[in-house]
Amino acid sequence: MRVLTRIPGWLKNKYFLTTVGFVVWVMFFDNRDFITSHFRERAELIKLEKSKQYYEQQIAVTQKELDQLKTNPALLEKYAREKYLMKRDNEDLFLIKEGSGPKTR
């Protein structure tokens, strides 16, 4: 009983103990605790920055191709033939799929 008399009154307050328990729970044990969520968000930020860099590179490549297609009619025709399988009226188009030939053992 002497031990309880040595503890200050504010440490025995049920509201104070509840608040301390809640803060400890939120800081360390919750799914969105302070420490884990910080590292998780940091990792996601790094991943998003890499993704942003990749897409910026893809935009630059696509913009370069678009500029070339606007200025070079021969390249435009080649692109239309390869990507959209376009042909002239007097041509026949044969599609050959890779790996569709006879199988040999």
Image (tube, rainbow, N blue to C red):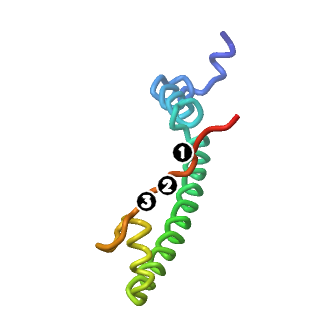
| Mark 1–mark 3 distance (CA, rounded to whole Å) | 14 Å
CB-based contact (under 8 Å), mark 1 and mark 2: yes
Image point 60% across, 50% down: which residue? Answer: 43
Residue matched to label 3: 94
Query: Which residue carries the number 1 mark?
Result: 100
Contact, CB < 8 Å: mark 1 with mark 3?
no
The residue closer to the viewer here, 71 or 99, is: 99
Q: Badge 2 local density, few (<14 within 10 Å), some, or many (20+)?
A: few
Residue in the picture at 50% in, 76% down: 60
Q: How many marks?
A: 3
Question: Dot 3 lies on which element?
Answer: loop
- Separation of marks 3 and 2 at Cα, in angstroms: 6 Å
Q: For this view, does 48 lie left or right of residue 81?
A: right
> Where does the N terminus fall, quadrant-wise?
top right
Report the Cα–Cα distance between label 1 and label 2: 8 Å
Secondary structure beneath label 2: loop
Left or right of 91? Residue 37 is right
What amino acid is at disc 2?
Ile
x and y, in percent, of residue 2 in the image = 68, 13
Residue 74, image x, y percentages: 43, 85
Q: Which mark is residue 30?
A: none
* Image quadrant where residue 47 sits: bottom right
Residue type for callout 3: Phe
Q: Write down the residue under mark 2.
A: 96
Question: In terms of depth relative to the viewer, which is nearer, 3 or 102?
Answer: 102
Task: Decide: few, some or many residues near mark 1? Use Cα within 10 Å; few <14, some 14-19, many ≥20.
Answer: few
Q: Amino acid at mark 1?
A: Ser
Residue 52 against residue 33 in the figure, above or below = below
61, above or below 21, in the image: below
Tell whether label 2 touches label 3 (CB within 8 Å).
Answer: yes
